[in-house]
Image: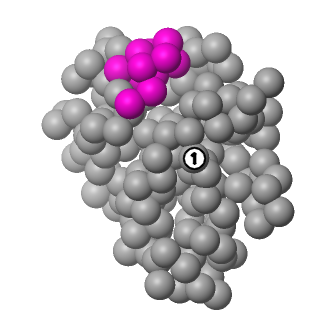
């Protein structure tokens, strides 16, 4: 049985769940208001092997590192470990998301081309939307083909806040 350690931190844009395994690999990072989505993803990915969630204050220092990100230490998320389940395609997309530099964005079509699948922008969008480790796997850095802030499970206003925080959007 997989034991998942969980903590909840306060951020400028709402409470955030931080969930990792006992080796301190992130398994989920999700906004409190979207806990139902997080629980569905945890069930999809870990139900077959079985899992149990256990409260833990700042497991592996991950909560403190995410707090540091919100306090302006943007690069701290680059080295945070994650171990996500998902299909091979989803994991490929999630790995590519981590290569988008802070302060930059990529369009869904560009990401599909980068993955060698130029016609798969919608599939990339679906994989992006299934990302269980938001912020650390920065799905907020992917925008619509016309530059619109589209497709963020945490909400467009939160996506805009994150992109302003990272220096992409000004104002």
Please determine whether, in this image, residue 106 is positioned above or below residue 52. Answer: below
Please determine whether, in this image, residue 27 is positioned above or below residue 56. Answer: below
Q: Position of residue 74 (x, y in %)?
A: 45, 27
Q: Position of residue 78 (x, y in %)?
A: 35, 39
Q: Is residue 43 visible?
A: no
Mark 1 Cα-neighbour bin, 10 Å: few <14, some 14–19, many ≥20? few
Residue under the image location 65 percent in, 74 percent down:
109
- Toward the left, the furthest residue is 23
Residue stretch rendered in magenta on the structure: 65-75
Residue under the image location 56 percent in, 76 percent down:
112
User: Secondary structure beneath disc 1?
Assistant: loop
Question: Mark 1 = which residue?
Answer: 104
Please determine whether, in this image, residue 100 is positioned above or below residue 14. Answer: below
Residue under the image location 56 percent in, 69 percent down:
111
Q: Position of residue 147 (x, y in %)?
A: 79, 56
Q: Does the magenta run of residues contain 73?
A: yes
Q: Is residue 136 visible?
A: yes
Quarter of the picture containing the C terminus is top right
Left or right side of 38 for 63: left
Q: Nearer the viewer, residue 132 or 120?
A: 120
Left or right side of 84 for 8: right
Magenta-drawn stretch, dominant element (helix, strand or loop): helix
Quadrant in which residue 151 is drawn:
bottom right
Residue under the image location 49 percent in, 75 percent down:
114
């Amino acid at each position: 049985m997989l034991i998942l350690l969980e903590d909840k931190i306060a951020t400028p844009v709402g409470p955030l769940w931080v969930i990792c395994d006992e080796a301190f690999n992130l398994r989920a990072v999700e906004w409190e208001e979207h806990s139902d989505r997080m629980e569905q993803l945890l069930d999809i990915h870990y139900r077959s092997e079985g899992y149990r969630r256990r409260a833990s204050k700042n497991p592996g220092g991950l909560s403190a590192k995410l707090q540091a990100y919100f306090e302006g230490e943007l690069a701290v998320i680059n080295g945070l470990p994650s171990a996500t389940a998902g299909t091979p395609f989803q994991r490929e997309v999630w790995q590519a998301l981590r290569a988008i530099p802070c302060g930059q964005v990529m369009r869904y079509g560009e990401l599909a081309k980068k993955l060698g699948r130029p016609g798969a922008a919608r599939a990339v969008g679906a994989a992006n939307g299934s990302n269980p480790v938001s912020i650390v796997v920065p799905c907020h850095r992917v925008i619509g083909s016309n530059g619109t802030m589209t497709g963020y499970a945490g909400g467009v206003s939160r996506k805009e806040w994150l992109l302003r925080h990272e220096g992409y959007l000004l104002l």
